[in-house]
Amino acid sequence: MADRSRDWRADLVTTYADLFQPVGDPPRAQGWPSVDDGWEDLLARACGRIRAAVLADGGSFHTIQVKEKFGTLRFYWEGDLSPETAAKVEEAVDLAEARSAVTCEVCGGPGRLHGGRWVTTRCGAHAEGRRPVRVQPGDDTYVFERVVGKRRSILHGRYDRESDTFVDVAPFGTEET
Ligand SMILES: [Zn+2]
């Protein structure tokens, strides 16, 4: 077992103590990232975006759980934030989860879902004999919401790894909140 005090996860929960509320020495946190090293960068990006949104809002934020499930990232949180800020936080989480689907969990290089008895997101070098899962049309489409003022829009788009944004974004519909 690696020395937790020298682990990037410890650095992350310490750097973003406002989001993780770590305890103890070396730090532990409820939301301690239970993911492999290749996802360090996408988690750091997410934390930077979340902090910016929460600071601007002045509300509260707490990371509940960060883990891998069915090959991609899950980032669970709770907080007391305005709807607009909550949507910004959700967008940061959506971007991180979308990025995890195209980023090798071992090395951080471009990857894709590989299957077998269980599925993981890996590059070819770290696939460990598992085969790439066939991508069906629409598999790379994400559904998310944006809130601007009192308007909540449900959108769908495709994740672009190069720009780390959702592209080809189109509305499903709009409702007043
Ligand atoms: Zn890899």
Image (cartoon, rainbow, N blue to C red):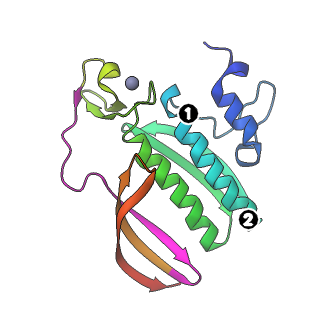
Q: How many numbered discs?
A: 2
Task: Answer whether residue 135 is magenta in the image.
Answer: yes
Question: Would you call the spot at circle 2 few (<14 residues within 10 Å), some (14-19), or many (20 or more)?
Answer: few
**Residue occupying the point 43% across, 64% down:** 144
Helix, strand, or loop for circle 2? helix
Q: Is mark 2 within 8 Å of ligand 1?
A: no
| Viewer-proximal residue among 66 and 90 | 90
**Residue placed under numbered mark 1 in the picture:** 40
Task: Answer whether residue 95 is magenta in the image.
Answer: no
**Residue placed under numbered mark 2 in the picture:** 56
Q: Position of residue 114 (x, y in %)?
A: 28, 31
**Residue occupying the point 35% across, 62% down:** 157
Helix, strand, or loop for circle 1? helix
Residue range of the region highlighted in magenta in the rendering:
131-151
Residue, far bottom:
176
Name the side, left or right, on which 104 lies relative to 14: left
